[in-house]
Amino acid sequence: MPSELLKQVRVVDPSSQMDRIADVLITDGVVMAVETAIADYPSNATLTEGSGLILAPGLVDLYSHSSEPGFEERETLKSLMQAAAAGGFTRVAILPDTAPALDNLASVAWLHDQSNLVGTVPLLQPWVALTLEAKGQHITELAELATANIVGFADGKPLQLVMVRRLLEYLHPFGKPVMLWAWDQELAGNGVMREGTDSIQIGLPGIPAIAETAALAALLECIEAIGTPVHLMRISTARGVELIRNAKERGLPITASTSWMHLLLNTQMIASYDPNLRLDPPLGTPTDQVALIDAVQQGVIDAIAIDHTPYTYEEKTVPFAEAPPGAIGLELALPLLWHRFVETGLWTAIELWSALSTRPAICLQQKPPAIAPSPAGTQAIAQPAEMILFNPQQGWIAKPQSLKSSASNTPWLNQEIQGQVIKTWC
């Protein structure tokens, strides 16, 4: 059996609150030992010097978009999976807004078949649509779909409150994750960035924060009345954080996530008019950004999602207000978040990994990836490793030629990125 010894690597594992330098012995894809120093190892083991490297559980993405089927000119399943693997993601949950939508058993089976043909890393897990074609009009065959190999139910789009009420009542007995986006499109109107001083100075139509918070307050009332657990996606406002904090204190069965870009950027950056900064929901104000950062660290916001949204060069190379909202991120999130929060000492490595791996898995009602030695060294009962080796100092340029994604709609295009995943076990 092939063995590998990682010598003096930094092991980060939120499940065991481990952050220490150790030797790690891996045999046939299973972690056999994590010790201060390992002297007894197979003679044929490959030795890897781990100084400066991070060994940690694989990352889990709560929601991203697949352009296949329907929009293969943007990205294929193959390039999506290659981008996710390059970024350290071993599990990616796919939103159902493909064409055709993931709203029936056949489409779910097709996605699994195609992803299995492409490869095994990452594991693609489909969110199945709550409504037919994810259009918010007619409910899908929820009971039938609940029997399929799905991560849970979501449209990834805002829904009318009367539809939400019916869905939560129907879904309550199934015990599957349910994910909703609190957003009022009528209040958002024709806005393209968060309303405020920056939108006035930049000269772009604004979207008021209440487009999120009014819908969120109503949704929380609905959850409290019905009792169905819900994951709240795309939280982007300081007031939204406050509403979630209060709801959790009252014991509502909710979890929540925000996008990685909302932690790194704010409305002031839109002065560049880079169309890749147009997002849905829009980037928040500096006050929103600070509130989201604190909420992730405190666990009020449970997880960081990537919401990877590929577009072609032609689709995004237009004026800001005409650009479709969204940006790619699977390859970029980990290194940029690491250097912004861990290298600066704002977060610990465990706090970042918890928000990108452990807590997203818990939101999906899954066992989180973890680094744990085989019990008593007995490989027969051990679980295969699901982990990555990350070099936070390895530099690379985010060029179209170096990105694994076939899309390159990111504000970090052609910039140097510090940090790269160099190996994955899954």
Image: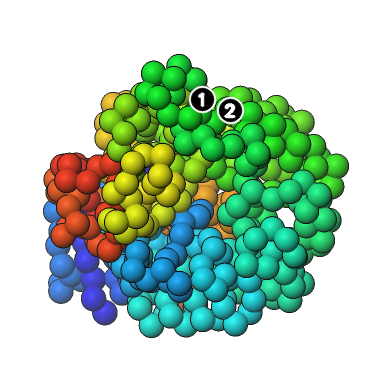
Left or right: residue 23 compared with residue 180: left
Q: Residue at x 85, y 42 (%)?
A: 225
* Three-letter code, disc 2: Ala
Q: Is residue 214 visible?
A: yes
Which element type, helix, strand or loop, lies under badge 1? Answer: loop
Q: From the viewer's side, name the closer residue of 66 and 304.
A: 66
The residue located at (63%, 28%) in the rendering is: 210
Q: Which mark is residue 209?
A: 2
Q: Secondary structure at mark 2?
A: loop
Q: Are marks 1 and 2 in contact (CB under 8 Å)?
A: yes
Looking at the image, which is closer to me, 46 or 240? 240
Q: Is residue 288 left or right of residue 152?
A: left
Q: Decide if residue 348 is on the left or right side of residue 423.
A: right
Q: The N terminus appears in which quarter of the rendering? A: bottom left
Residue 369 vs 231, above or below: the answer is: below
Q: Position of residue 2 (x, y in %)?
A: 23, 76
* In the image, residue 278 above or below residue 84: above
Residue 342, position as x, y percentages in the image: 32, 33
Real-space Cα separation, disc 1 to disc 2, in angstroms: 7 Å
Can the viewer see residue 333 in this picture?
no
Question: In percent of the image, x 51 and y 40: which residue is there?
Answer: 281
Closest to the camera, between mark 1 and mark 2, is 1
Label 1 belongs to which residue?
195
Q: Nearer the viewer, residue 205 or 409?
A: 205
Q: Which mark is residue 37?
A: none
- Residue occupying image coordinates x 54% and y 63%: 97
Going by the numbered disc 1, the residue's amino acid type is Glu
Q: Earlier in the sequence, mark 1 or mark 2?
A: 1
